[in-house]
Image: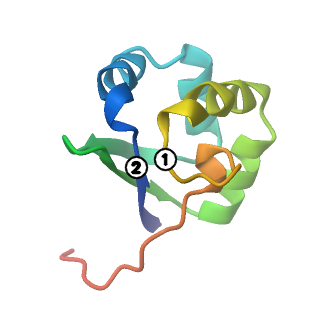
Amino acid sequence: MQRVCFLLKVRADRLAEYRERHSAVWPGMLRALTEAGWHNYSLFLREDGLLVGYLETPDFAAAQAKMAATDVNARWQAEMAPFFEALDGAAPDEAVKPLTEVFHLA
């Protein structure tokens, strides 16, 4: 099982709305994530907008590809893109660059 951690930056003026959107994630999006192999998925948001994402999956590239093939993900990413800084035209899920794990206490 791969453990994946990534960082993104939420715009300071959109923090409250970002939190609100994630208090009611679309059921279809939740289903798609589960079916694509995203497990133990969490997002942590710091007050300055730093977003830390963590998930576990058997194969992250395959899990990303499965999500990219869903309509619900395309709609969710389009709605979420304006919340983020420095995406350089990419959708938020395309801007995810996993961090290198340097330690894990099993």
Is any part of residue 59 visible from this angle? no
Residue 48 image position (x, y, % from top left): 23, 45
Quadrant of residue 61 within the rendered picture: bottom right
Outermost residue on the bottom side: it is 102
Please give the residue where the numbered disc 1 appears in the rendered image. 85
Question: Does residue 26 lie above or below 90 as drawn?
Answer: above
* Callout 2 secondary element: strand
Q: Tell whether 25 sits left or right of 91.
A: left
Other-residue count near label 1 (Cα within 10 Å), few / some / many at <14 / 14–19 / ≥20: some
The residue depicted at 40 percent of the width and 38 percent of the height is 11
Q: In this view, does 37 lie above or below 23?
A: below
Amino acid type, callout 1? Glu
Q: In this view, does 34 lie above or below 65?
A: above
Q: How is the image coloured?
A: rainbow
Which amino acid type is marked by label 2? Lys
What residue appears at the point 49 percent right and 41 percent down from the top-left corner? 84
Answer yes or no: do the residues labelled 1 and 2 have beta carbons within 8 Å?
Answer: yes
Residue 9: assigned label: 2
Residue 68 is situated, as x and y percent measured from the top left of the image, at: 75, 44
What residue is rendered at 54% in x and 15% in y?
27
In this view, the residue in front, 104 or 53, is 53
Question: x, y percentage for residue 97?
Answer: 53, 66
**Which of the 4 image quadrants contains residue 22?**
top left
